[in-house]
Structure formats: C-alpha cells, structure tokens
C-alpha cells in the first residue's frame, strides 16, 4: 500500500474515533469507474476493520465502538474522503480475550484490502494484536487502551521506546490516569489511609499500581492491596481484609467497570 493511501485511511480511522467531519471531493456525476452518490470508487474497496468485544460482559462498550466506527465510515464514503475508493467496515468480536483477539487480527491481516483497524478495547488484547497488524503495516487506532507499554515499551517509565510504529491511541495512559486519581484523593480529599483493589488484568492492575505509587509518594499509606476475580460475586473476604485495616478511602481499578472510583469515606457494606 502506498504511503498516501495509508495516510488517507489513517485520517478515516481518526474520524471513526472522533466522528469529526471530513472534507469532500464529491462530484455531481460519477467519474472513472463510477460510484453511487457521485464518488469515484474506480480503484476498488478498502476495508476498515475493528477488533472489540461485541459479545460478553464488555459488549456494551464494544458495540458502542462498532456503531461509532460504522457511522464514521458511512460519513467518509458520503464525503468521498478517500479518492478512488469505497470504504467498507468489518468488525470482529474478540470477546475481550487476547487469544480470540489474535485470531481476529490474523483474519483481518490476511486480507490485502484491510488498511486500518479500530480497537482494541482492552490493553491486554492490544498486546496480542499489535505485532500481527504491524507485520502487514496495518494502522491500528484504539479509543480505550491505557497501558503505557503499548506506546512506550516495557520500560515505559524509565526508558520509553516505541515498540510498534503502526499503533496509535486517543486515550491517555495509566501513567497519567493513576497519579491523577491519587492526587485528587490525597491532596484534595485529604485521605491518608487507602485500600486499593484490582482485578489482576492488564488494565486494572496497571492502573492500580500507578495509583498506589503516586499515593505513596504524596505521603499516604496504602494499607491494603486486594484482588478480585473477573467472575467473583462474593466479596466478603476482600471486604473483611480491608475493613481490618481501617482505611479512610478505597479505590478500585478493574477492567469491566469505570477505571477508578474514589470514595470520600470508608463505609462497610450493610
């Protein structure tokens, strides 16, 4: 694929995330091979893929991504954003699982018409998808990944180095989100004894670690670090362990809920 085509499709991917208006090369009559709506699509079809959880516990988020990307592709086609081509959207379900995400990436990468992929939702799935898409030079843009290593490498905090030049995101990283939450809880809310809970997954554990490090730097004490399973329904053991430490606040970072919830005071559940 030419660099020009790559840049053009990258612009469409950005539109899929931001739903911004695109400039148009609309013609009143079909040109070249002709196209519905007056756009020239004589050079063929380009596919914008998506890898996201379209089923399972995270499907509400994944389907929101899919609907937004589909709208952006429709708008791009209407505006003739990529001259000579019609865009087609192809979403693939990863169920929030790295293995399935890898299979979806392999499927998309095997099609020479795929020029860009929106996704993934989870940082853990992107870690699997990145190298597969990179081998084919396919642009990937995520609206949700926050793990720093995806753009800064394994030594993100001390020796940042970009691992894949085809990967981009529009969400900030755990290096920003975690400390921001800690700054609020310690400096604004004045909490000094904090319990931290995560789910052990890439997103939740990474965010919780950055929060705990910053809270400690600010002089607060992390009195408990607990972990819950993705399918856990009984949290009595975690609650008992935390309550014994008498924290004045708790923060939770899990992959299936909003990233950090800061409570101004600790109250044991009834």
Image (tube, rainbow, N blue to C red):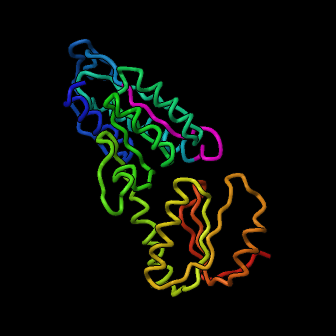
Residue 124 place in picture, x, y as percent: 51, 47
Which picture quadrant has residue 142? top left
Q: Is residue 52 left or right of residue 77?
A: right
Residue appearing at x 40%, y 39% in the figure: 130
Q: Is residue 55 magenta?
A: yes
Residue 23 place in picture, x, y as percent: 23, 38
Which picture quadrant has residue 159? bottom left
All told, the count of numbered labels is 0
Residue appearing at x 35%, y 21% in the figure: 113
Residue appearing at x 29%, y 52% in the figure: 161
Q: Which residues are magenta?
A: 47-60
Q: Is residue 194 magenta?
A: no
Camera-side residue of 43 and 265: 265
> Considering only vertical position in the picture, is 109 above or below 232?
above
Residue 90 place in picture, x, y as percent: 46, 28
Residue 107 place in picture, x, y as percent: 47, 24
- Decide if residue 221 is in sight here: yes
The quarter of the rendered structure image containing the C terminus is: bottom right
- Decide if residue 188 is in sight here: no
């Amino acid at each position: 694929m030419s660099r020009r085509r790559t840049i053009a499709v990258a612009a469409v991917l950005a539109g899929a995330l931001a739903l911004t208006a695109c400039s148009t090369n609309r013609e009143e009559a079909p040109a070249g091979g002709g196209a519905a709506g007056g756009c020239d699509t004589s050079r063929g079809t380009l596919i914008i893929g998506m890898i996201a959880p379209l089923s399972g516990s995270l499907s509400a988020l994944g389907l929101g991504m899919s609907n937004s990307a589909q709208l952006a592709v429709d708008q791009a086609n209407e505006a003739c954003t990529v001259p000579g081509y019609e865009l087609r959207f192809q979403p693939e379900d990863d169920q929030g699982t790295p293995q399935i995400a890898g299979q979806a990436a392999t499927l998309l990468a095997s099609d020479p018409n795929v020029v860009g992929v929106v996704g993934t939702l989870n940082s853990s799935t992107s870690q699997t998808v990145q190298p597969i898409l990179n081998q084919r030079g396919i642009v990937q843009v995520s609206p949700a990944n926050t793990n720093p290593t995806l753009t800064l490498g394994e030594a993100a905090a001390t020796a940042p180095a970009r691992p894949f030049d085809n990967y981009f995101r529009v969400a900030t990283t755990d290096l920003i989100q975690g400390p921001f939450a800690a700054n609020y809880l310690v400096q604004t809310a004045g909490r000094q004894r904090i319990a931290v809970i995560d789910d052990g997954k890439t997103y939740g554990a990474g965010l919780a670690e950055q929060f705990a490090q910053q809270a400690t730097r600010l002089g607060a004490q992390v009195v408990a670090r607990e972990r819950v399973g993705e399918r856990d329904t009984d949290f009595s053991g975690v609650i008992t362990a935390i309550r014994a430490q008498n924290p004045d606040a708790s923060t939770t970072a899990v992959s299936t809920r909003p990233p950090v919830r800061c409570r101004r005071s600790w109250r044991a559940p009834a």
